[in-house]
């Protein structure tokens, strides 16, 4: 069930973004209004800044809040397990292991969703430009298949060895480079022969049913 969390978060974000009355559209509108309000506001008032200035301030700050929370969650996901591998057996308790296994994927999905919201609302131009770079888009189309097939490739390689593995930094570098190349090579073949043809057929069928338009890309 922990692996279903990213899918559910992604589906929820997609539904919210597609909805005409979604909070995401509201946030984008608030940010645009905030720039106008802060440019024309007077700093004087009986209680400090007027309400529309305070509202404008928070509307302008929310992208930074989301990006900060995303960075904290995603960095904790990646580097939070540093102490886990420092000694054998691990110093983590069963509770700590359970919490990480249960919530790490959810935290990563929420962090990605926060970044996506900022990019959709045009509040993170640098990150949006990097993620929209065409080579990364092509690589992104292969990532899921690489994720699916890389355990198979690792098992085939490791179980076919006639001797035991002697772990070292050099072995890790060579082995994981090989796994990466093989996984994306298989993913490319699967995308060309399975994923893309299936996507094209689904687009045609949905267009015939009046539920979409053909995908010509």
Image: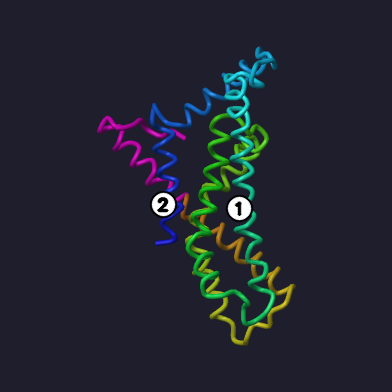
Taking 207 as reference, is 45 above or below it?
above
The image quarter in which residue 14 lies: top left
Taking 40 as reference, is 153 above or below it?
below
Q: Quadrant of the N terminus?
A: bottom left
How packed mark 1 is, by other alpha carbons closer than 10 Å (few <14, some 14-19, many 20 or more), is many
Quickly name the residue at label 2: 194
Q: Secondary structure at mark 2?
A: helix
Residue drawn at the location 66% of the way across and 73% of the way down:
85
Position of residue 199 measured from the top left corner of the image (x, y, whole percent): 39, 43
Mark drawn on residue 74: 1
The image quarter in which residue 159 lies: bottom right
* Magenta region: 192-217
Residue drawn at the location 58% of the way across and 48% of the way down:
139
132 vs 30, nearest the viewer: 30
Position of residue 72 measured from the top left corner of the image (x, y, whole percent): 63, 50
17 vs 176, nearest the viewer: 17
Mark drawn on residue 192: none
Taking 20 as reference, is 7 above or below it?
below
Q: Give the mark, 1 or 2, whose residue is nearer the N terminus.
A: 1
Q: Which secondary structure is most common in the magenta stretch?
A: helix
Which of the two marks, 1 or 2, is nearer to us in this view?
Answer: 1
């Amino acid at each position: 069930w922990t692996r279903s969390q990213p899918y559910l978060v992604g589906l929820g974000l997609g539904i919210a973004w597609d909805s005409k009355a979604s909070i995401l559209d509201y946030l984008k509108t608030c940010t645009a209004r905030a720039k106008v309000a802060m440019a024309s506001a007077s700093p004087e008032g009986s209680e400090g800044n007027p309400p529309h200035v305070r509202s404008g301030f928070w509307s302008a700050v929310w992208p930074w809040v989301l990006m900060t929370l995303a960075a904290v969650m995603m960095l904790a996901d990646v580097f939070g397990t540093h102490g886990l591998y420092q000694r054998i057996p691990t110093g983590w308790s069963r509770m700590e292991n359970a919490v990480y296994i249960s919530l790490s994927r959810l935290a990563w999905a929420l962090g990605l969703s926060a970044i996506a919201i900022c990019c959709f609302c045009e509040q993170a131009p640098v990150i949006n430009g990097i993620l929209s770079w065409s080579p990364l888009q092509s690589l992104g189309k292969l990532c899921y298949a690489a994720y699916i097939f890389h355990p198979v490739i690792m098992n085939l390689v490791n179980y076919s060895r006639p001797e035991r593995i002697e772990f070292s930094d050099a072995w890790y570098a060579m082995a994981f480079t090989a796994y990466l190349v093989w996984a994306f090579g298989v993913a490319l073949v699967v995308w060309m022969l399975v994923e893309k043809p299936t996507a094209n057929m689904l687009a045609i069928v949905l267009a015939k049913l009046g539920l979409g338009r053909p995908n010509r890309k």
